[in-house]
């Protein structure tokens, strides 16, 4: 197994890869419907929900768009503290919605007080928040942010992108009162790309009934009508559903809390390594991601040279994202990565730096 310490796509376990090679079935067959039903039942545990989990053919960005098209008629507040939250604001704008930005410096979290102030000034149908900003390595305090939305503006829907954290850190859909929680397959779920999962709240589904021009492919009401028959409006990405079935068993066998703790320990270990080598974490203290560490490249390491060195050992890390490309590098600690893998990586990096 190669070791990709990049924030998606991540390594996929051989048996999960192999599950994709099972023979196809007619998607409207009892056999496939049974698989589809049980993958949803298992996925609900990852979302901490008793409600719906949609299994959608497409990547996570499609479900950012679905959140906008289904739950926002006119106005949305986009919390922006990195490249993926910026993307979500652009998704809203390009779908013709009025978007106000609540911008916070990259590397900082969205603060509940600042969000409360913004909601007191103006009413919004929804607010978009990225739980784990993969570009900066910041994990936003979703539980606290959701609590202030409920308090200050109770009818505002809370749309959350957890593409690089769901299944890797605790996010409780029902208990925290989230309204749309979405993720993709190729990050913490350690599946190949092309499948996206999302859970809507009951009130979000009610809201969708009032929103015009939800479109066809991303319409949650149409999706739900088919879901009730263990199916989808269009042909689902069946190989990935087969893989999801196997991978969810593996994730649940590890135990969610064990999985969350494993990621957090690895992230702390990477952070400590960086500090011991005279570099700092780009993310502010108190809001550091458990699934990806963004390190200020204060030693001016040539990341592409480093990666050439690491690749000879079957490993690779990631440079910074977008405007941070040259200034930072990123080490992901998500998916199936173990502490042993991290030790091997950091040992190799030590070797490179000692050269
Ligand atoms: C990777 C990522 C996305 C984009 O997901 P795709 O599956 O590539 O569409 C969106 N948001 C976050 C936080 C991400 O890390």
Image: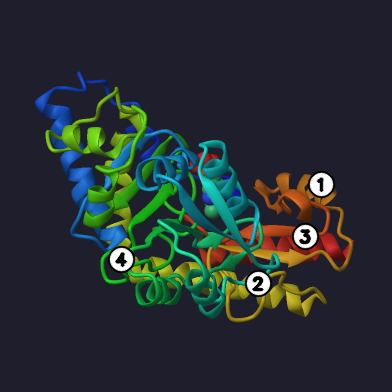
Q: Position of residue 91 (x, y in %)?
A: 54, 41
Looking at the rendered image, the disc whose residue lies closer to the viewer, 4 or 3, is 3
Q: Position of residue 210 (x, y in %)?
A: 27, 43
Q: Would you say residue 8 is visible in this rendering? A: no
Residue 114 in picture, x, y percent from top left = 57, 76
Q: Is mark 4 within 8 Å of ligand 1?
A: no
Q: Name the residue carrying label 4.
A: 255
Which residue does the numbered mark 3 point to in the structure image? 328
Q: Are marks 1 and 2 in contact (CB under 8 Å)?
A: no
Q: Secondary structure at mark 1?
A: helix
Task: Give the Cα separation between the discs numbered 1 and 2.
Answer: 27 Å
Q: Quadrant of residue 268?
A: bottom right
- Looking at the image, which is closer to me, 1 or 63? 63
Packing grade of label 3 (10 A; few <14, some 14-19, many >=20) is many
- Given residues 161 and 351, the one toward you in this image is 161
Mark closer to the chain start, 1 or 2 = 2
Colour theme: rainbow
Tell me, yes or no, whether the two marked residues, 3 and 2, touch with CB atoms within 8 Å: no
Rendering quarter of residue 133: bottom right
For disc 2, the marked residue is 108
* Vertical comparison of 82 with 354: above or below: above
For marks 3 and 2, the one nearer the N-term is: 2
Q: Quadrant of the C terminus?
A: bottom right
**Which label is found at residue 148?**
none
Residue 304: mark = 1
Closest to the camera, between mark 1 and mark 3, is 3
- Indicate which disc, 1 or 3, sits on the residue closer to the N terminus: 1
Quick one: SS at disc 3? strand
Question: Circles 4 and 2: CB distance less than 8 Å?
Answer: no
Separation of disc 1 and disc 4 at Cα?
36 Å
Is 227 positioned to the left or the right of 177 in the image? left
Identify which residue is drawn at 30% across, 59% down.
Answer: 47
């Amino acid at each position: 197994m190669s070791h990709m310490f990049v924030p998606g796509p991540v390594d996929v376990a051989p048996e999960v890869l192999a599950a994709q090679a099972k023979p196809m079935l007619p998607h409207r067959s009892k056999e496939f419907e049974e698989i589809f039903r049980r993958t949803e039942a298992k996925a609900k545990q990852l979302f901490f929900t008793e409600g719906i989990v949609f299994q959608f053919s497409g990547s996570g960005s499609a479900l950012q768009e679905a959140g906008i098209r289904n739950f926002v008629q006119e106005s949305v507040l986009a919390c922006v503290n990195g490249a993926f939250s910026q993307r979500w604001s652009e998704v809203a704008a390009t779908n013709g919605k009025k978007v106000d930005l609540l911008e916070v410096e990259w590397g900082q979290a969205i603060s509940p007080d600042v969000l409360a102030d913004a909601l007191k000034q103006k009413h919004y149908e929804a607010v978009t928040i990225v739980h784990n900003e993969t570009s900066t390595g910041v994990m936003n305090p979703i539980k606290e942010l959701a609590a202030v939305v409920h308090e200050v503006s109770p009818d505002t829907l809370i749309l959350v992108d957890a593409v690089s954290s769901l299944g890797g850190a605790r996010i409780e859909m029902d208990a925290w009162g989230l309204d749309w929680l979405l993720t993709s397959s190729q990050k913490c779920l350690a599946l190949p790309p092309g499948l996206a999962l999302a859970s809507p709240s009951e009130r979000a589904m009610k809201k969708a009934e009032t929103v015009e021009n939800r479109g066809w492919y991303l319409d949650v009401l149409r999706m739900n009508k088919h879901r009730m028959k263990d199916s989808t409006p269009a042909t689902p990405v069946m190989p990935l559903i087969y893989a999801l079935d196997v991978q969810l068993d593996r994730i649940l066998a590890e135990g969610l809390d064990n999985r969350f703790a494993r990621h957090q320990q690895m992230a702390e270990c990477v952070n400590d390594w960086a500090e011991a080598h005279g570099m700092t974490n780009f993310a502010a203290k108190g809001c550091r991601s458990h699934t990806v560490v963004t390190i200020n490249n204060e030693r001016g390491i040539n990341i592409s040279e480093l990666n050439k060195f690491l690749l000879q050992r079957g490993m690779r890390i990631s440079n910074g994202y977008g405007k941070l490309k040259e200034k930072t590098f990123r080490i992901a600690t998500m998916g199936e990565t173990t502490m042993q893998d991290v030790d091997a990586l950091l040992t190799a990096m030590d070797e490179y730096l000692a050269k």
